[in-house]
Amino acid sequence: MYIVLVIIGIIIFAIILMPGYTQRIKKLGNVQGQKSLAELKKMKIGDSLQWVMIRSENIDNPILLFRNR
């Protein structure tokens, strides 16, 4: 029983420390789009750190981020 609890603790610890991840956008079946974008980043917005997920089927389309006070 002790070994099971240790293994579960290690798995939970690894999940907490693992960085975020998002898969690229797939088109028509399992083929990934050539120009797709998928990012998950920690950014400083204003005075606090925030996680930002950016996903797009086409990197030629710009991203606009508005910050309102």
Image (cartoon, rainbow, N blue to C red):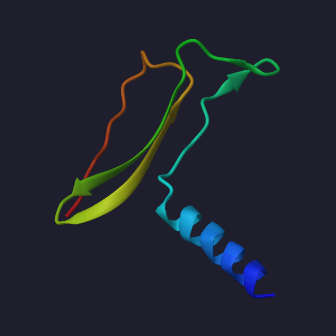
Q: Farthest residue in the top direction? A: 34
Q: Nearer the viewer, residue 24 or 14?
A: 14
- Residue 20: x %, y % from top left: 50, 51
- Residue 51: x %, y % from top left: 39, 56
Vertical placement of residue 15 versus 31, above or below: below
- Residue 18: x %, y % from top left: 51, 56
Vertical placement of residue 55 versus 42, above or below: above
Please give the name of the residue rendered at 32% of the width and 36% of the height, measured from the top-left corner. 64
Please give the name of the residue rendered at 51% of the width and 35% of the height, measured from the top-left corner. 55
Q: Farthest residue in the bottom direction? A: 1
Left or right of 31 on screen, residue 36:
left
Q: Nearer the viewer, residue 4 or 17?
A: 4
Please give the name of the residue rendered at 69% of the width and 25% of the height, measured from the top-left corner. 26
Vertical placement of residue 24 versus 30, above or below: below
Q: Nearer the viewer, residue 11 or 50?
A: 11
Please give the name of the residue rendered at 77% of the width and 79% of the height, measured from the top-left corner. 4
